[in-house]
Amino acid sequence: MIKNNFALICFSLIALNGCMNLATPPAEIVGIHVSTIKYDPFKCDRLTIELDSLRQREGNLVIAQNGRVDSAMVQAFWIGYGTGDGMAAMELATVRGEIQAVRKTMRKKGCTLPAIPQPVIKKETIKDDDWG
């Protein structure tokens, strides 16, 4: 009985250790507060261009952070701890804050706000003939 409990405790500790210092998934990274003062001098067309640029940067950072999450999980599996968050996570939070500030400025100025794009989720479909 004592050996079984000891084995269970050891296994639990090893399993929990594998979750240490994993990178944050991009969907869980929220924007930091950014003042709108920076964008007050911009006109609507310039704000739209700025928003598009920030969204492109956000997309690149999401890809980078997803790669970080994947590599951290592999590392955690093999050596017990992950790489954690890096510069991409911090920059993603900043860019998301900038996007919020630009959108807030656009609302204040009465600019036409573009729709917030929905994330694209690719699902692989299995066809009947794929099963052989």
Image: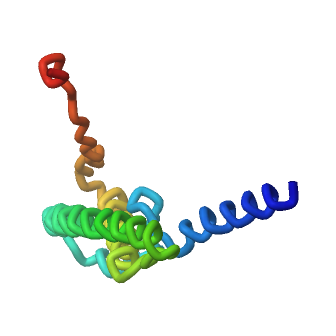
Whether residue 4 appears in this view of the structure is yes
Residue 22 location, x and y as percent?
48, 70
Q: Is residue 105 above or below residue 114?
A: below
Q: Decide which of 64, 17 is in the foreground and name it.
A: 17
Residue 63 location, x and y as percent?
25, 63
Could you tell me which residue is drawn at 73 percent across and 61 percent down? Answer: 7
Residue 50 location, x and y as percent?
19, 69
Could you tell me which residue is drawn at 38 percent across and 81 percent down? Answer: 86
Q: Is 72 displayed left or right of 15 in the figure?
A: left
Q: For the C terminus, give its image quadrant.
A: top left
Query: Based on the displayed image, in which of its 4 quarters is residue 87 positioned?
Result: bottom left
Could you tell me which residue is drawn at 21 percent across and 67 percent down? Answer: 60
Q: Is 66 displayed left or right of 13 in the figure?
A: left
Residue 111 location, x and y as percent?
25, 55
Query: Based on the displayed image, in which of its 4 quarters is residue 120 positioned?
Result: top left
Q: Is 9 displayed left or right of 31 in the figure?
A: right
Query: Based on the displayed image, in which of its 4 quarters is residue 83 positioned?
Result: bottom left
Residue that protrudes farthest toward the right in the picture: 1
Q: Decide which of 1, 70 is in the foreground and name it.
A: 1
Q: Decide which of 36, 97 is in the foreground and name it.
A: 97
Whether residue 44 appears in this view of the structure is no
Q: For the N terminus, give its image quadrant.
A: bottom right
